[in-house]
Amino acid sequence: MLYQNDIWNQDIDRLLEEVLDLQPLSGSRILITGAAGLICSSLVDILVRFNDTRDGRIRVLACGRSEETVKKRFASLLGREDFSFVYYDAAKGNNCFPEAADYVIHGASPAYPAAVMKQPVETLLSNVTGMAELLAYARKSGSRKALYISSSEVYGQKSSLKPFDIQEYGYVDILNPRNSYSVGKRAAESLCVAYGHEYGLDTVIARPGHIYGPTASVQDSRVSSVWPYDVAKGKDIVMKSDGSQLRSYCYTLDCASALLKILVDGISGQAYNISNPDSVISIRQLAEILADVGGVQLQREQASSEEKKAFNPMQNSSLDASALLALGWKGCFTAEEGLAHTLAILKGIVGMR
């Protein structure tokens, strides 16, 4: 199990030692949607590790559509008093929350391109109506803060290679079903700010870049998830573009630590880019690092017309993380370190299957 992996726990301990002060969260109840996903499962592991090593006494309410998936991911946590499963479907609404939460984190949404293209309706609703329901719940619960996990895709397209500032927005084609993701993220962000303005609810917004790590699903069709699994199995990397697209890649534990920093110290109504300055690289550089660390070859193929429909249209999605860095956050893992740790962990997981 991942929570019992030595490399994973050592990485979490490093974050707790060098970056995170989670004492303000001690004794609180934190509801997390999308808890079994790439980013939020890392959040859960950090919070539980904080409980285990620093007597944090945080209760984690892990929300998901599939009890089986959540329990499989967190098998080692079942039966503990500080962890419980809550059924939750962001797209359908009318969810039943068994108790109030001090903090609410909304991370449930289809995110990888194949899922977005297959379910653009559910993608949009998971963000907009899902956020609306959670904000109403947070207000009724008297929650201290609600954190929305948005995306760098809210920025749209631009021609320069300068990183996106938090108030810089480019073009998004609202008639392209692939953009149900970015449109839904934009609308949900506005809803968070509206709740703060009208009802006084403390809300903060996080905009992660491109996140990778051993918590990625095998169904995730993004190259930052597909390639590590392929390399862990000894397969060559197949790149279907020229790889020039610039991305703010971030190890999932660095991303999760940034989210917790925003939850604790973020200013109400503000958005924060999550980007490690040591990991802003192109897709080609990502492939080259993985190939070098994993000892495989990098190959080129032409993408089919169907595959191209799911591509992220942003040539540049690098992010300016000045606001996040001003909170006292730092990334602990370079691209080389994060990808090496991801491969090491995945090789163990793949070998167990």
Image (tube, helix red, strand yellow):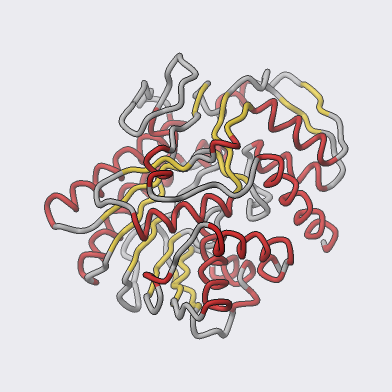
Q: 262 above or below 16?
A: above
Residue found at x 37% / y 41%: 323
Quadrant of the snapshot with the C terminus: bottom right
Across and down, in percent, residue 22 comes to 44, 67
Across and down, in percent, residue 351 comes to 85, 59
User: Which of 329/121 is in front?
Assistant: 329
Position of residue 231 in the picture relative to residue 44 (left or right): right
Across and down, in percent, residue 288 comes to 76, 30
Q: Please tell me how many numbered marks the rendered image carries.
A: 0
Across and down, in percent, residue 94 comes to 31, 64
User: Which of 29/79 is in front?
Assistant: 29
Residue found at x 43% / y 21%: 157
Of all residues shown, which one is farthest toward the left? 198
Position of residue 136 in the picture relative to residue 323 (left or right): left
Q: 323 above or below 24?
A: above
Q: 193 above or below 99?
A: above
User: Which of 350/58 is in front?
Assistant: 58
